[in-house]
Structures are given as structure tokens and as C-alpha cells.
Amino acid sequence: PLKLVSDAAVSAFVNGVLKEQLTYGANGIYRGTFFPKPGDEIKIEVAAEGFGRIKSQTVIPKKPGIAVTDSTVTVREGEYTVSNQPNTVNKSTTRTCRYS
């Protein structure tokens, strides 16, 4: 089974600058308070007794650009009767959306 480490030194760097030391919560999970922004380069370094030092890094992606150049919305309303319910009139609404 996996051995949980509760006494590791977990450092969070943002754009090459130490931002904070993460704190141990429970079940091998370390938490920080910093919320990265798009474009931030995040690096995590971990050191614990009996283990080799490890690090990982990534860049927080920017939000994708979405452009809607044309759209159509069609709304149809109607009534219908179901044959096994002769004295009942049902209403229906159908919406169709097209984006291009």
C-alpha cells in the first residue's frame, strides 16, 4: 500500500518566486491558499525524509476565446391529443438553437 507522508516540505513557486509553504491537511493532501491566474507558471517542490526531492511545473492556460458570429433560435408551440386520452389536450414547446 501507498505510504502517506505527513511531514514533507511542500513549496509553491509562482513565476519563479516562492509564494508559500503548503500545509498538511489529511490523507496525504497538502493545501495552499494561493489561487493561480491564467499565464502563471506554477512550480511545486517536495522534500521529505527518506525520499528523493521532486518537483513539477506547469503553466496555467489562458481562457479560450469564443466568438459567436451568427445564431438562430426557433420556438414552436403546438397542441396535440393522445388517442388513449380522448378529452385531453396537451401543449408542447420545441426550441431549436443553431450557432455558426
Image (cartoon, rainbow, N blue to C red):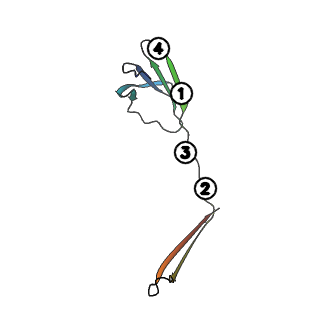
Q: Which residue is mark 1?
A: 57
Which of 37 and 92 lies nearest the eye of the viewer?
Answer: 92
The amino acid marked with disc number 3 is Lys
**Please, what is the three-letter code of the amino acid marked with disc 4?**
Phe
Which secondary structure, mark 1? Answer: strand
Mark before the other along the chain sequence, 2 or 1: 1
Quadrant showing the C terminus: bottom right
Give the quadrant of the N terminus: top left
- Between the residue at mark 2 and the residue at mark 3, the CA separation in whole angstroms equals 13 Å
For discs 4 and 1, the disc positioned in front in the rendered view: 4
Element under disc 2: loop
Question: Residue lying furthest right in this view?
Answer: 100
| Mark 2 / mark 4, whichever is N-terminal | 4
- From mark 1 to mark 3, how far is it between C-alphas? 19 Å
Find the distance from the CA under tag 2 to the CA under tag 1.
Answer: 31 Å
Whichever of callouts 4 and 1 sits on the residue coming sooner in the sequence is 4
Residue 58 at what x, y percent from top left? Answer: 55, 30
Q: Residue at x 36, y 26 (%)?
A: 23
45 displayed left or right of 96: left
Query: How many residues crowd mark 3 within 10 Å: few (<14), some (14–19), many (20+)?
Result: few
Precedes in sequence: disc 1 or disc 3? 1
Residue at 35% in and 25% down: 24
Q: Is 18 rendered above or below residue 80?
A: above
The residue lying at 40 percent from left, 20 percent from top is 5
Q: CA distance from mark 2 to mark 4?
A: 49 Å
- Disc 1 marks a residue whose amino acid type is Gln
Category of crowding for the residue at label 1, using alpha-carbon neighbours closer than 10 angstroms: few (below 14), some (14–19), many (at least 20): few
In this picture, residue 92 sits left or right of residue 49: right
Q: What is the spatial separation of the Cα atoms under label 4 and label 1, in whole angstroms?
A: 19 Å
Q: Which residue in the structure is indicated by mark 2?
A: 67
